[in-house]
Amino acid sequence: MQPSIQKQNTTLTHAEVLTEAESLGTSSGGIMLSRPNCLDIQGSTRLIAFNSTHPLKTVQPDSTAIILVGYQNDYFAQNGILRGVVEEPNRVDNVLANSLAFIRAVANTPITIIATPIVLEPDYRALANSVGILDTIKTSGAFKAGTPGADTIPELLALGDRITYVTGKVGFNAFSNTELENVLTHRGIKNVLVAGMITSLCIDSTGRAAYERGYNVRILSDCCSARTRIEQDFFCQNIFPLYGGVLDSKQAIDQLLKVAA
């Protein structure tokens, strides 16, 4: 179900609000997110507010996929090189526990489960001009092909061929340089759930890319983590509702299993 957006007593579709925001942002000085679920257009008297509740009541498991981003040792192992990227490492453990609980709960439904690991050549040529966290990945030696840190976490490997692996990811976006879109198209996927690391980077980038390709996007809020709690809340409350929806893993399990029953 697409969110409804109210503007001067007019209801806009989700796609229309993005168009409206872009046009106003160009002509009126930009877009500023000032509080949860509101989009303030600077230089305009208009305020676009939207409901970020996105149930999956009509979503069929056989047309739904969950994209697992970054479920590798360098994020999730106790000695992972990038575990410290998250301010409170116990939140990484919570993400893993919630993710595994979700996967095990829906494993017997037709939902497609896809893992999209990032594995980089030892010379890091894909990150030749990297900045920010990608530069941190390069300088720290994370996700280097042939190292334990680049390996998929054992908990996922234990699920065998129930997980579909899509390789080739070398940046934030799981669609870029991979066959992910072809896999989703081949399986008739219409709805995409996104989970993993890091909320403000790979999760947001992958979610946006899915939306731009016509998929209904939902972010599993308790199956991903940003670097800080404030950053996590900001993206879940202000960013993701602009192009998709947010729900936690228990809500998703309840709704998917209800449909599958």
Image: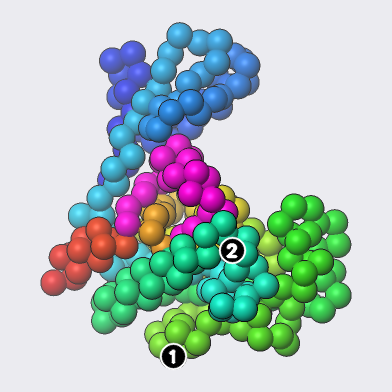
Q: Few, some or many C-alpha atoms within 10 Å of disc 2 (few <14, some 14-19, many ≥20)?
A: many
Please state the horizontal and vertical placement of residue 196, each as a whole percent of the image.
49, 64
Q: Which element type, helix, strand or loop, lies under badge 2?
A: loop
Q: Which residue is mark 2?
A: 174
- Quadrant containing the C terminus is bottom left
Q: Is residue 199 above or below residue 174?
A: above
172 sits to left or right of 4:
right
In front: 118, or 260?
118
**Spot occupied by residue 125 in the image (x, y as percentages of width and height):** 84, 69
Dividing the picture into quadrants, the one containing residue 236 is: top left
Task: Tell me if residue 231 comes above or below residue 90 in the rendering.
Answer: above
Residue 237, visible in the rendered structure: yes
Q: Circle 1: is it few (<14), some (14-19), or many (20+) Cα within 10 Å?
A: few
Residue designated by label 1: 158
Please tell me in which quadrant of the rendered image residue 35 appears.
top left
The residue segment tinted magenta is 224-248
Q: Is residue 152 left or right of residue 259?
A: right
Q: Could you tell me residue 85's position as x and y percent? A: 62, 60
Residue 153 is situated, as x and y percent measured from the top left of the image, at 53, 82
Q: Residue at x 51, y 19 (%)?
A: 41
Residue closer to the observer: 209 or 242: 242
Amino acid type assigned to the residue bearing label 1 in the image: Ala
Question: Disc 2 or disc 1, which is closer to the eye?
Answer: 1
Q: Earlier in the sequence, mark 2 or mark 1?
A: 1
Look at label 2 and name its amino acid: Ala
